[in-house]
Amino acid sequence: MLQTKLDQLAKRRAAADPLPTAVAPFTSSNFFKSTESDSKPKARSCQHRLSHEAKRLTVSPLKAASRNHKHNDLVSLGTARPSPEYFPWGSLNMSSPESTSAGADMSLASCLTMQSVRDEADYDLAIALNYGYTVGSPQILRFLTEHVEMVHDPPYSDWECCVTCGTTSALEVALRILCNPGETVIIESHAYSGTLACSRALGIHLQSVKLDEYGLVPEDLDNILTKWDLSQGPKPHVLYTIPTGQNPTGTTQPLERRKQIYQLAEKHDLYILEDDPYYFLQYCEISSSNTSSASTDLDQYLKTLPKSYLSLDTSGRVLRMDSTSKILAPGLRAGWITASSLIIDKFISFSEVGALHPSGPTQVMLYKLLDKTWGHDGFLRWLMTLSAQYRRRRDILLAACDKYLPSDVCTWKTPEIGMFVWISVKLPKISTSAGTFLNGDTPWTAYLDVEEAIFNQAQENGVLVSRGSWFMHDKTELDEVSFRLTFAAAQKDSLERAVERFGSAIRSYVEHSSL
């Protein structure tokens, strides 16, 4: 029960030492985890999976010196921080919706105000505006560590969290920790375009695995790894996946599928990069009655969330990436990762010579909202309410698809989680610049011709969609083209009109291209 966990958290906080308040204090998830975590087995070492770069990189001596002192009245002449008395900000004022409950006004017409000021006991604004510790401030790291243990409860003891500058930044660091240039990462056959671009820029090769309606296909993954030809390079040891509300296809891996894939990771000694920004946008109905309590509704919501790879990870072979972008605001440029202590230590070392640490003002905003205003139950209630809001948008778009897309050539699935609907358009007998081809015998150039024609016509009609080829690594021959539609960004009252325009573009192409 959630309330039991919240009560335990409150007792643990009450018995804990006060949070450190110095500039860039050393902190760790180990300060905030429950004692139950200590009784679990430790992660297996993944030292052999570290890249050459990761093995070379060590802790910054300046950072190490600042974290190891024990003097209560230490005067620092060693760290080149500017004096906070010259920072030109004295306070930071914020407001948020008064309630996070379902049906509450989310327009800020009725709101709660929050303020961060200098010399504040909980989180001094002057401290937040200065250089910080790479893992994040103690205030926000405590909340995120508690959140991860409450939601995922990793089944090994030496896991830790680290606040990040968002998943895009975290992914680049993760790939550099685990991969050398010329090595291969396993991805889904349709994968997030940012991952494709980042991997290529780092000199990392990619190997696609088939997707079906339940996500990544374990049989294909096993076949590829079992029959790997070493003339292609070393056998892949990293799998990147978006298991929940996958970008771009919107698929969600069911529990049995996740267990199969994790077992294959154990078999082939794969390290899993679990990118899960859509995890909390859950569209299952939460059945509540007039007599049910708010905590009961939250218990039901938590039960609808999929089991993450992190929650299945008995050997410490998962790095999970969470993000504030889809659940709070992308401009925060913040998120958090969870992994074994070894990987977190390497992540910190990379960050110390890169982004250094997440924005201090961002961390203040997160602390004031998540910890001081909402608390864990309020945050979960916000996520449940946000899911209900996006579900309404999804349903509007799906109803428009039923109404306006030609069902004889278009297919799609209802996403259970996430922000995307994946539209597949079966290719008719077509005539293109590459020649005339029959259905099922369409080379890549003809595929792109068809996709571009529909895409351009949709734009002329006044709607922008994402082309499926943008998310593909392998230039395979296909008998359908695909497009990603998102119901998240456009105004609700324009979703139906947008789908009508897209449907018109498809009809126009099919009618004019059939022989």
Image: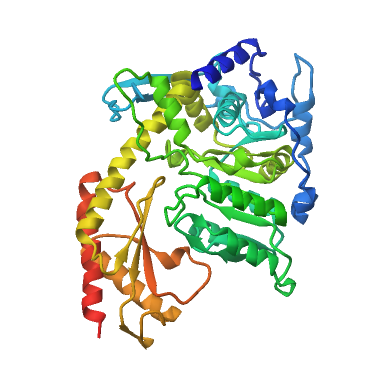
Kindly indicate the quadrant of the structure image that contains residue 85: top right
Q: Looking at this view, is 400 or 49 the one in front?
A: 400
Estimate the x, y position of residue 12 in percent, counting from the top left. Answer: 62, 15
Q: Is residue 285 above or below residue 108?
A: below
Name the residue located 32 percent from the left edge and 63 percent from the top edge.
411
Name the residue located 63 percent from the left edge and 44 percent from the top edge.
319
Residue 513 left/right relative to 233:
left
Estimate the x, y position of residue 388 in percent, counting from the top left. Answer: 33, 36
Estimate the x, y position of residue 263 in percent, counting from the top left. Answer: 66, 51
Kindly indicate the quadrant of the structure image that contains residue 295: top left
Q: Is residue 431 above or below residue 278?
A: below
Residue 293 left/right relative to 368:
left
Q: Is residue 293 above or below residue 419?
A: above
Residue 43 left/right relative to 351:
right
Residue 89 visible at all: no
Name the residue located 37 percent from the left edge and 18 percent from the top edge.
293
Q: Residue furthest front?
A: 256
